[in-house]
Amino acid sequence: MLYPSIHELKKNVDSKYLVVTMAAKRARHLQDEPEDLILDEYKTLKTVSRALEEIAENKVTEQH
């Protein structure tokens, strides 16, 4: 089961495509700079899941 759910993610982001794009960019950044964490606590160690958690908490926004 995906955590956070797509319904939680879409509360802060308009489209699924944008969620995927934002998560991929953030996950790459976390992989390159593992100490650059935004949240105090994560439910997983995987970078993509951490990026999704940050999006769900509205800590990561779309960058133009």
Image (spheres, rainbow, N blue to C red):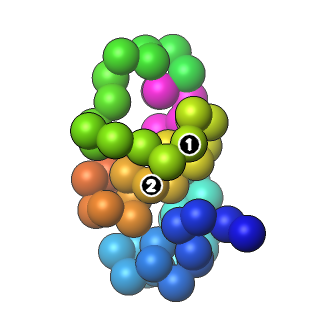
Residue 28 belongs to magenta span: yes
**57 above or below 25?**
below
Q: Amino acid at mark 2?
A: Glu
- Secondary structure of the residue carrying numbered label 1: loop
- Secondary structure of the residue carrying numbered label 2: helix
**Would you identify the image quadrant in which residue 17 lies?**
bottom right
**Would you identify the image quadrant in which residue 39 lies?**
top left
Marks 1,2: beta carbons within 8 A:
yes
**10 above or below 54?**
below
Residue 52 belongs to magenta span: no
**34 above or below 53?**
above
- Which residue appears at 42% of the width and 43% of the height? 42
- Which residue appears at 31% of the width and 62% of the height? 57
In the image, residue 47 lies at what x, y percent?
Answer: 57, 35
In the image, residue 56 lies at what x, y percent?
Answer: 39, 65
Q: Closest to the observer: 2 or 64?
A: 2
Q: Which residues are magenta?
A: 24-30
| First of labels 1, 2 by sequence position | 1
Say the numbered circle drawn on residue 55: none
**Residue 62 in view of the camera:** no
**26 above or below 4?**
above
Instruction: Name the residue carrying label 1.
Output: 44
- Which residue appears at 53% of the width and 67% of the height? 4
Left or right: 11 in relation to 40: right
Q: Closest to the observer: 40 or 8?
A: 40
In the image, residue 6 lies at what x, y percent?
Answer: 58, 77
What crowding class fits label 2: few (fewer than 14 Cα within 10 Å), some (14-19), or many (20 or more)? Answer: many
Q: Main secondary structure of the magenta part?
A: helix
Counting labels gives: 2
Q: Amino acid at mark 1?
A: Thr
- Which residue appears at 57% of the width and 74% of the height? 5
Instruction: Name the residue carrying label 2.
Output: 53
